[in-house]
Image: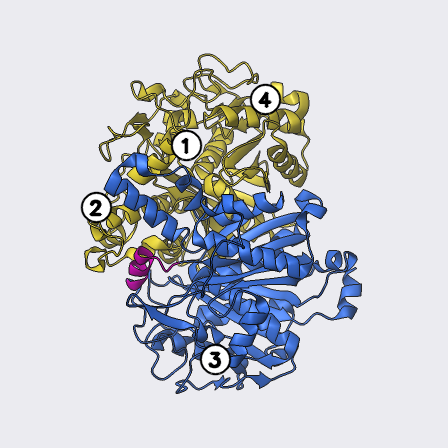
Chain colours: A blue, B yellow
Amino acid sequence: MTRAVVTGIGIVAPSGVSAEEHWRSTLAGEVRVDRQDGTLAGRVPGFAPEGNVDSRLIIQTDRWTWMSLAATRQALDDAKYDPAAHDPYATSVVLASGSGGNEFGQREIQALWSQGRRAVTAYQSIAWFYAASVGQTSILHGTKGPNQVLVSEGAGGLDSLGAARRVIRRGTPTVIAGGTEAPLSPYAIVCQGTSGRLSTSGYRPFDADADGYVPGEGGAVLVVEDAATAQVRGAQQIYGEIAGYAATHDAHHHEQPAPDCAQLVRAMRKALADAGATPDEVGFVMADAAGTPALDALEAQAIREVFGRPVPVSAPQGFVGRLCSGGAALTVATALLALRDGVVPAVGNLARPGHDLDLVREPRRLDTDVVLVNARGFGGFNSSIVLRRHREEGLRDAG
Amino acid sequence: MSRRTVVTGVGVVAPGGATRSAFWDMLTAGRTATRRITFFDPADFRSQIAAECDFDPRAAGLTPQEIHRSDRFAQFALVAADEAVKESGLDLAAVDRDNLAVSIGSAVGATTRLEDEYVAVSDHGRHWQVDERYGSRFLYQALVPSSAATEVACRFGAHGPAAVISTGCTSGLDAIGHGHQLIEDGDADVVIAGAADAPISPISMACFDAIRATSARNDDPEHASRPFDATRDGFVMGEGGAVLVLEELEHARRRGAEIFCEVAGFANRSNAFHMTGLRPDGLEMAEAITESLNQARLDPTAVNYINAHGSGTKQNDRHETAAFKRSLGQHAYDVPVSSIKSMVGHSLGAIGAIELAACVLAIRYGVVPPTANLENKDPECDLDYVPKNAREQRIDVALSVGSGFGGFQSAAILRRWTS
């Protein structure tokens, strides 16, 4: 079977606007959540589209797309992959988007209702909708392979990687995948408030005092390639393989999670089986870490059930907030950096561990080949992915 | 690929007919459902017409709470899914719910509810810092359109993979294509797959006004959607939803299901050209068509019906005419091509699923739906567009295509099932 490997990482997140800055900040344990205008959120400090995005594109696109384009540029540079140097049909763009162009959309609706329909700009039709970032990325980089846009709230980042692997297995060797989100404009914040999951005091996943999450912006974009193709073109590095992926749905209630964690357990087990890995091979788990007591307890229970041993669990997103569809993509990027350096970052913002888990309190040396990442989406989406350190031997086999 | 996908149920909520049978009656009669907008006063807008659904969610079986918390697009998805699942004869008590998946397409999600609520929380656009106390308790469901997939999954207890696919105007085709791939890959045995959109709202009409993409034939709404006609002047907004029950062939056989047709191929490509513009050569759509035929192991000459994107913009009609010629060669001149958007308008992400539903029914009943309002062909569109009247004809292989903002081009092949 074709193997999908990650060869490039791009990050725009509260923790940094590059993979290495993000990784440094994460290992240093810097909390990048702050309060502005009364709203607690994880903001990307000083992120401006100028310098990251072509000036003609800036006015046509929302902040979420700026972040996506900037992360894509980084990921392609990191992978030393230029789509223009390849057959245009050899590259696809498969991203997650949870809420679209929030700030742009609010501005246009504001203009419509305060000034009339002629105040709505021509770009509303291409900037707000969920496919805008994928369309702009595909046009900017000249990619003609199959594109896809997945919406499954917090699970979207993993679902985009699962979909990227499907695209690769069907013959398109390179996929730009992952996701970003920019949900901090006033209306988007109000909408998120109705989820009943926002904290006004801080995002403290797995903490005894956890009382919800803090929203954040940004995410990650990865270059995912067929392993054999990556080898032939002499890829700069291979961070790891997307070895297993599975998705399930609670199908229980429109906003409450199922009172058991059966479907999350099933997603984790299916992803492991898909990777041909046993629970014992997994060195650490990157949790979804929703930050509400009930959701954290369910995930803790699921992890205990699947592993039956105190597997190390981390959730560095506590440092930056939950980034909706960008979040899980960022977690995967972090997990790959952890595999690379043999260091597991700490659970973010954890003061008083509240669950019976081996929660990573300080960066921990851990040389392992396999990590499992969970992500859940509001309404009952459960996705799991298994990442495996890439072995050169396997690469030759694949070739 | 050894796992094959068949269609065993169809549900439709469309303008002019809120059930599958009403929809099909309308298409075969060549009636149009485009009219002056009634949902709000459109007097100030450039395009004042749309194809609206006469839809009563209570009568369609939704509970007061489902209606209260869901945008109209999610309501369409639920009602169409209900009809499709009922029709399929699927025994939900017997089916393995772990392998029951959901794939719902939507281009703009809950845009109408987001706008309605915004008017209140911003007090008619007066305040940028909006007042949450005036908002619905269910605004988060509106912000994240994945709520539609959640609603459908909850209704049928579907524990398999669930997602909303949002690739603009190809969302419907792509969501059904995604469902088909879930079956091929062994990730599901049954997929509730379709799409819904409800974009007839001031912001949606205003944004297409701004780029003059929609028709301004306001004095003649019934005849305003005129794909391939020399006098066309843009698309007419629509709304609605359609859902197919996709099933792995052996699964359908084991339970003795009636099989409508097979999903024999699906492919999508991007034009990497422009967010709204199309090159006249139709190259990337042709690539998608050719790849979907390859998957079906069919020669281009096997196609005997094409359901066109046919939005009724000049550039689209010429783009896809070129794509058909490029992919099918001389056969393009012999195969009937029609656009049901002439009757039900363009419901953005929903239309791809509604059009595939029309293809399933066209194969089943042996009728090619017409292109309404086609009086005088654009001289550069020189294929057989089945003007005005439906045509009785056996259809073994139907091709449906879609094209959307962002450069998305998709194609699906449905094949008559013979056991």
Tell me, for residue B335, which label it has, or none.
Answer: 4
Please, which chain is the residue tagged with disc 2 on? B
Label 2 crowd bin: few (<14), some (14–19), many (20+), radius 10 Å: some
SS label for mark 4: loop
Q: Which residue is mark 3?
A: A347
Q: Main secondary structure of the magenta part?
A: helix
Q: Which residue is mark 1?
A: B211
Rendered position, A128 above or below A291: above
Q: Nearer the viewer, mark 2 or mark 4?
A: 2
Which of pointers 1 and 4 lies earlier in the amino acid sequence?
1
Q: CA distance from mark 2 to mark 4?
A: 51 Å
Residue situated furthest top in the rendering:
B376
- Give coordinates of residue A309: x percent, y percent: 54, 86
Rendered position, B208 above or below A329: above
- Give coordinates of residue A345: x percent, y percent: 54, 79
Part of the protein shown in magenta: A183-193
Q: Are marks 1 and 2 in contact (CB under 8 Å)?
A: no
Looking at the image, how many numbered discs can be counted on the residues? 4
Q: Amino acid at mark 4?
A: Val
Rendered position, B201 above or below A230: above
Mark 1 vs mark 3: same chain?
no
